[in-house]
Image: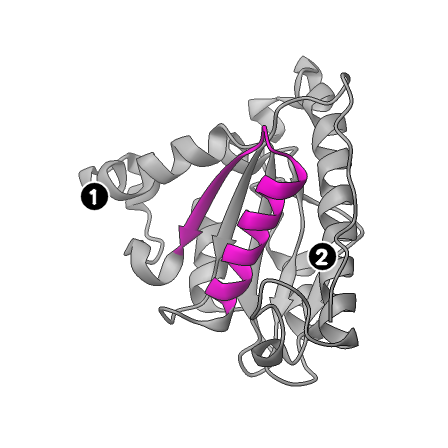
Amino acid sequence: MTHQHTKYTNTPTQQKMKYAIICGSHRENSQSVKVAQYLENRIKELYPEAETYLLELATANVPFWDPGVWAGEDKWKTIWSPIAAELQSSDAIIPITPEWSGMATPMLKNFFLLASGRELGHKPGLIVSVSSGRGGAYPVSELRTSSYKNNQICFIPEHLVLRFITDRLNETEAVDESDAITRERIDFALNMLHTYAEAFKGIRKQEHIYNDKFKFGM
């Protein structure tokens, strides 16, 4: 079955963007990694001028949070600082998680503990949840509830729940109607994220949104 990707035409008003894709699976070569790589490739097809940064937490060896990250201990300078620099230069964030026992992964939640407003603040985020079956909704609810408070990421209204993922996104073109619809929905979500990313660049230029006295959410 041939799948016609959504066409997206760059206009002179559009700005160059950088997308950070965070793969939260603890497993190497996982279905979540497959999704992350598909999204990265699709972004490059939709926006040839865009940059991407793919962080696979399964191989990044990021420790679980401890107060030393606030004190700037050497291990955090070595491990987290290069990641933080990539995030700071990004305009949009795409966290990806499998659903494990109805939850997002510990590594992804740890990522949101480590990231501050300097990395994610006032940047649009597209939540992507991955399931081998009919699940995937619970991690979306969890991330919308408990991952944004201090880092001030702004999740857009759209999200992706990619079900039966082992049967989808495996070939260059869609193999059936379900695969085609999945790809079309991904394009729709990426186009929406891109639109938010353009608008949020203007928001981050406003000095009044940065106030160290109120840098954490309530």
Query: Mark 1 sits on what residue?
Result: 75
Predominant SS of the magenta segment: helix
Give the left or right position of residue 109, taking residue 77 as reference: right
Residue found at x 78% / y 54% = 158
Whether residue 63 is visible: no
Q: Amino acid at mark 2?
A: Ile
Mark 1 or 2: the one toward you: 2
- Tell whether label 2 touches label 1 (CB within 8 Å): no
Q: In the orientation shown, which residue stands out farthest toward the front?
A: 2
Tell which of 167 and 55 is nearer to you. Answer: 167
Which numbered dot is residue 186? Answer: 2
Asked whether 5 falls inside the magenta stretch, the response is no
Tell which of 162 and 203 is nearer to you. Answer: 162
Give percent across and percent down for residue 195.
77, 35
Looking at the image, residue 37 lies above or below residue 162 = above
Considering the image in quadrants, where does the N terminus appear? bottom right
Q: In the orientation shown, which residue stands out farthest toward the left?
A: 74
Q: How many discs appear? A: 2
Residue found at x 71% / y 57% = 186
**Chain-order first, disc 1 or disc 2:** 1
Residue found at x 42% / y 34% = 86
Asked whether 34 falls inside the magenta stretch, the response is yes
Q: Amino acid at mark 1?
A: Lys
Which numbered dot is residue 200? Answer: none
Considering the image in quadrants, where does the C terminus appear? top right
Looking at the image, residue 83 lies above or below residue 11 = below
Tell which of 156 and 172 is nearer to you. Answer: 172
Give the left or right position of residue 81, taking residue 210 as reference: left
The residue stretch that appears in magenta: 32-56
Q: Residues within 10 Å of mark 2 (few under 14, many from 20)?
A: many
Query: Could you tell me which secondary element the residue under label 1 belongs to?
Result: helix
- Please identify the quarter of the rendering in which residue 215 is found: top right
